[in-house]
Amino acid sequence: MPHADGATIRPIETSGRRDAILEALTDFIVSSKLAPGDRLPPERELMAGLKVGRSSIREAIGHMQALGVVEIRRGSGTYLKRPVSEKTLFMPLSIATQRDGLLQTLEVRRGLEVEASMLAAKRATAQDIDEMRAALDAMEAEHLEFGTAGEADLVFHLSIYKASGNPLFEQLLGQMREAFESFFAQPFNRPDFASSSFEFHRMLFDAIVAGDAELARQHTLAILEVVENDIVRMSDEEQQ
Protein backbone atom coordinates (compact mmCIF):
# COMPACT_ATOMS: atom_id res chain seq x y z
CA MET A 1 0.00 0.00 0.00
CA PRO A 2 1.75 3.21 -1.13
CA HIS A 3 2.04 6.15 1.24
CA ALA A 4 1.93 9.80 0.25
CA ASP A 5 5.71 9.97 -0.20
CA GLY A 6 5.87 6.75 -2.22
CA ALA A 7 6.96 4.44 0.61
CA THR A 8 5.04 1.18 0.86
CA ILE A 9 3.75 -0.78 3.83
CA ARG A 10 4.28 -4.32 2.61
CA PRO A 11 1.88 -7.10 3.70
CA ILE A 12 3.34 -9.75 5.97
CA GLU A 13 3.23 -13.39 4.96
CA THR A 14 1.83 -14.79 8.21
CA SER A 15 -1.04 -12.91 9.79
CA GLY A 16 -0.74 -12.34 13.51
CA ARG A 17 3.01 -12.77 13.78
CA ARG A 18 4.26 -9.82 15.79
CA ASP A 19 7.88 -10.14 14.71
CA ALA A 20 6.85 -10.01 11.05
CA ILE A 21 4.70 -6.95 11.77
CA LEU A 22 7.57 -5.26 13.62
CA GLU A 23 9.92 -5.95 10.74
CA ALA A 24 7.41 -4.57 8.22
CA LEU A 25 6.80 -1.47 10.31
CA THR A 26 10.52 -0.89 10.73
CA ASP A 27 11.06 -1.24 6.98
CA PHE A 28 8.28 1.27 6.38
CA ILE A 29 9.66 3.78 8.87
CA VAL A 30 13.12 3.52 7.33
CA SER A 31 11.92 3.75 3.72
CA SER A 32 9.59 6.65 4.60
CA LYS A 33 12.48 8.48 6.28
CA LEU A 34 10.31 9.20 9.30
CA ALA A 35 12.11 11.26 11.94
CA PRO A 36 11.51 11.55 15.69
CA GLY A 37 8.32 13.52 16.21
CA ASP A 38 6.72 12.29 12.98
CA ARG A 39 3.40 10.49 13.21
CA LEU A 40 2.98 6.93 11.99
CA PRO A 41 0.08 6.13 9.65
CA PRO A 42 -3.32 5.63 11.31
CA GLU A 43 -4.23 2.21 12.66
CA ARG A 44 -6.65 1.49 9.81
CA GLU A 45 -4.00 2.27 7.21
CA LEU A 46 -1.54 -0.06 8.94
CA MET A 47 -4.18 -2.81 9.10
CA ALA A 48 -4.93 -2.42 5.40
CA GLY A 49 -1.29 -2.26 4.37
CA LEU A 50 -0.13 -5.20 6.47
CA LYS A 51 -3.38 -7.15 6.03
CA VAL A 52 -3.62 -8.01 9.73
CA GLY A 53 -6.19 -7.37 12.41
CA ARG A 54 -6.42 -4.51 14.86
CA SER A 55 -5.23 -6.62 17.82
CA SER A 56 -2.05 -7.61 15.96
CA ILE A 57 -1.27 -3.99 15.12
CA ARG A 58 -1.88 -2.88 18.70
CA GLU A 59 0.32 -5.66 20.06
CA ALA A 60 3.20 -4.64 17.79
CA ILE A 61 2.79 -0.93 18.52
CA GLY A 62 2.61 -1.72 22.23
CA HIS A 63 5.90 -3.58 21.95
CA MET A 64 7.49 -0.63 20.18
CA GLN A 65 6.20 1.64 22.91
CA ALA A 66 7.70 -0.62 25.61
CA LEU A 67 11.04 -0.37 23.84
CA GLY A 68 10.80 3.41 23.86
CA VAL A 69 10.65 3.63 20.06
CA VAL A 70 7.22 5.22 19.71
CA GLU A 71 4.88 7.31 21.83
CA ILE A 72 1.12 6.84 21.79
CA ARG A 73 -0.75 10.11 22.29
CA ARG A 74 -4.38 9.57 23.12
CA GLY A 75 -6.64 11.13 20.53
CA SER A 76 -3.70 12.13 18.33
CA GLY A 77 -1.89 9.03 17.12
CA THR A 78 1.42 7.17 17.37
CA TYR A 79 4.62 9.18 17.04
CA LEU A 80 8.20 8.11 16.49
CA LYS A 81 10.32 8.94 19.55
CA ARG A 82 13.79 8.07 18.22
CA PRO A 83 15.47 7.03 14.97
CA VAL A 84 15.20 3.37 14.01
CA SER A 85 16.98 1.09 11.59
CA GLU A 86 16.43 -2.48 10.44
CA LYS A 87 18.31 -3.65 13.56
CA THR A 88 16.58 -1.49 16.13
CA LEU A 89 13.85 -3.85 17.28
CA PHE A 90 15.60 -7.19 17.09
CA MET A 91 18.47 -8.61 19.08
CA PRO A 92 19.07 -12.27 18.13
CA LEU A 93 20.51 -14.19 21.07
CA SER A 94 21.73 -17.77 21.01
CA ILE A 95 21.23 -20.08 23.97
CA ALA A 96 22.54 -23.59 24.53
CA THR A 97 20.05 -24.79 27.15
CA GLN A 98 17.25 -23.30 29.18
CA ARG A 99 19.40 -23.15 32.32
CA ASP A 100 22.48 -21.75 30.60
CA GLY A 101 20.43 -19.24 28.63
CA LEU A 102 18.66 -17.95 31.72
CA LEU A 103 21.89 -17.67 33.70
CA GLN A 104 23.60 -15.85 30.83
CA THR A 105 20.68 -13.47 30.55
CA LEU A 106 20.74 -12.91 34.30
CA GLU A 107 24.41 -11.89 34.19
CA VAL A 108 23.55 -9.16 31.70
CA ARG A 109 20.39 -8.14 33.53
CA ARG A 110 22.29 -7.83 36.79
CA GLY A 111 24.52 -5.12 35.40
CA LEU A 112 21.64 -3.34 33.70
CA GLU A 113 19.18 -3.48 36.58
CA VAL A 114 21.63 -2.45 39.27
CA GLU A 115 22.69 0.59 37.26
CA ALA A 116 19.12 1.46 36.27
CA SER A 117 17.88 1.22 39.86
CA MET A 118 20.67 3.46 41.13
CA LEU A 119 20.01 6.02 38.39
CA ALA A 120 16.27 5.88 39.12
CA ALA A 121 16.99 6.69 42.76
CA LYS A 122 18.86 9.77 41.60
CA ARG A 123 16.67 10.88 38.71
CA ALA A 124 13.09 9.69 39.21
CA THR A 125 10.49 12.42 38.78
CA ALA A 126 7.17 12.63 40.60
CA GLN A 127 5.49 11.15 37.52
CA ASP A 128 8.03 8.30 37.42
CA ILE A 129 7.30 7.55 41.07
CA ASP A 130 3.55 7.49 40.40
CA GLU A 131 4.03 5.07 37.49
CA MET A 132 6.29 2.82 39.56
CA ARG A 133 3.80 2.83 42.44
CA ALA A 134 0.91 1.88 40.13
CA ALA A 135 2.99 -0.89 38.54
CA LEU A 136 4.05 -2.22 41.93
CA ASP A 137 0.48 -2.18 43.26
CA ALA A 138 -0.66 -4.14 40.19
CA MET A 139 2.22 -6.59 40.62
CA GLU A 140 1.42 -7.14 44.29
CA ALA A 141 -2.28 -7.65 43.55
CA GLU A 142 -1.49 -10.24 40.87
CA HIS A 143 1.02 -11.99 43.11
CA LEU A 144 -1.41 -12.20 46.03
CA GLU A 145 -4.18 -13.56 43.80
CA PHE A 146 -2.22 -15.98 41.64
CA GLY A 147 1.05 -16.53 43.52
CA THR A 148 3.06 -15.10 40.64
CA ALA A 149 3.41 -11.73 38.91
CA GLY A 150 4.54 -12.52 35.35
CA GLU A 151 3.75 -9.61 33.06
CA ALA A 152 3.08 -7.28 35.98
CA ASP A 153 6.62 -7.89 37.25
CA LEU A 154 8.01 -6.90 33.85
CA VAL A 155 5.94 -3.71 33.83
CA PHE A 156 7.33 -2.76 37.25
CA HIS A 157 10.92 -3.26 36.15
CA LEU A 158 10.26 -1.35 32.93
CA SER A 159 8.98 1.56 35.03
CA ILE A 160 12.30 1.60 36.89
CA TYR A 161 14.20 1.54 33.62
CA LYS A 162 12.11 4.46 32.39
CA ALA A 163 12.81 6.38 35.61
CA SER A 164 16.55 5.97 34.99
CA GLY A 165 16.23 8.63 32.31
CA ASN A 166 18.12 6.51 29.78
CA PRO A 167 15.83 4.96 27.11
CA LEU A 168 18.43 2.34 26.17
CA PHE A 169 17.65 0.46 29.38
CA GLU A 170 14.01 0.01 28.30
CA GLN A 171 15.03 -1.15 24.85
CA LEU A 172 17.59 -3.66 26.08
CA LEU A 173 15.33 -5.24 28.68
CA GLY A 174 12.47 -5.49 26.20
CA GLN A 175 14.67 -7.07 23.55
CA MET A 176 16.20 -9.57 25.93
CA ARG A 177 12.83 -10.56 27.26
CA GLU A 178 11.44 -11.14 23.77
CA ALA A 179 14.39 -13.33 22.81
CA PHE A 180 13.52 -15.68 25.68
CA GLU A 181 9.75 -15.26 25.56
CA SER A 182 9.01 -18.98 25.36
CA PHE A 183 10.20 -19.55 28.93
CA PHE A 184 11.42 -16.24 30.38
CA ALA A 185 8.11 -15.31 32.02
CA GLN A 186 7.72 -18.66 33.79
CA PRO A 187 10.88 -20.78 33.56
CA PHE A 188 10.55 -24.55 34.00
CA ASN A 189 6.75 -24.12 33.90
CA ARG A 190 6.88 -23.22 37.58
CA PRO A 191 4.46 -20.49 38.71
CA ASP A 192 6.44 -20.22 41.95
CA PHE A 193 9.64 -19.21 40.12
CA ALA A 194 11.38 -16.40 42.06
CA SER A 195 8.28 -15.94 44.22
CA SER A 196 10.44 -15.35 47.31
CA SER A 197 11.81 -12.18 45.67
CA PHE A 198 8.35 -10.61 46.00
CA GLU A 199 9.02 -8.73 49.25
CA PHE A 200 12.18 -7.09 47.91
CA HIS A 201 10.28 -5.23 45.18
CA ARG A 202 8.51 -2.97 47.67
CA MET A 203 11.84 -2.39 49.44
CA LEU A 204 13.41 -1.45 46.11
CA PHE A 205 10.61 0.99 45.37
CA ASP A 206 10.94 2.60 48.80
CA ALA A 207 14.70 3.00 48.30
CA ILE A 208 14.15 4.73 44.94
CA VAL A 209 11.53 7.04 46.45
CA ALA A 210 13.97 7.88 49.25
CA GLY A 211 16.67 8.66 46.69
CA ASP A 212 18.98 6.05 48.26
CA ALA A 213 20.99 4.65 45.32
CA GLU A 214 23.07 2.28 47.45
CA LEU A 215 20.01 0.74 49.09
CA ALA A 216 18.37 0.43 45.67
CA ARG A 217 21.46 -1.46 44.48
CA GLN A 218 21.29 -3.84 47.43
CA HIS A 219 17.62 -4.67 46.96
CA THR A 220 18.09 -5.18 43.21
CA LEU A 221 20.90 -7.64 43.89
CA ALA A 222 18.71 -9.42 46.45
CA ILE A 223 15.95 -9.88 43.86
CA LEU A 224 18.36 -11.22 41.26
CA GLU A 225 20.02 -13.54 43.78
CA VAL A 226 16.64 -15.17 44.36
CA VAL A 227 16.18 -15.52 40.60
CA GLU A 228 19.61 -17.12 40.17
CA ASN A 229 19.08 -19.55 43.04
CA ASP A 230 15.72 -20.63 41.62
CA ILE A 231 17.18 -21.16 38.14
CA VAL A 232 19.82 -23.48 39.56
CA ARG A 233 17.49 -25.26 42.01
CA MET A 234 14.62 -25.81 39.58
CA SER A 235 16.97 -26.91 36.82
CA ASP A 236 18.49 -29.51 39.16
CA GLU A 237 15.02 -30.70 40.23
CA GLU A 238 13.98 -31.04 36.60
CA GLN A 239 16.93 -33.28 35.84
CA GLN A 240 16.36 -35.62 38.79
Image: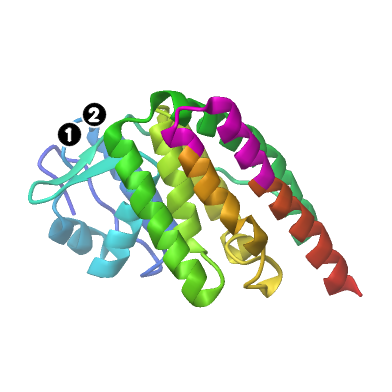
Question: What is the magenta range?
Answer: 207-222
**SS at mark 2?**
loop
Measuring from the top left, give residue 103's x and y in whole percent.
75, 49
Residue 221 on the magenta segment = yes
Other-residue count near label 1 (Cα within 10 Å), few / some / many at <14 / 14–19 / ≥20: some
Residue 111 on the magenta segment = no
Residue 69 seen in the current view: no
Other-residue count near label 2 (Cα within 10 Å), few / some / many at <14 / 14–19 / ≥20: some
Q: Quadrant of the C terminus?
A: bottom right
Q: Which residue is mark 2?
A: 35
Q: Residue at x 35, y 61 (%)?
A: 12
Q: What is the CA distance from the residue labelled 2 to the residue labelled 1?
A: 6 Å
Main SS type for the magenta part? helix
Q: Tell me the kind of residue under disc 1.
A: Asp
Quarter of the image for residue 53 reads bottom left
Q: Which residue is mark 1?
A: 38
User: Residue extending furthest right?
Assistant: 240
For the residues bearing labels 2 and 1, Cβ distance under 8 angstroms: yes
Q: From the viewer's perspective, is 142 left or right of 11?
A: right
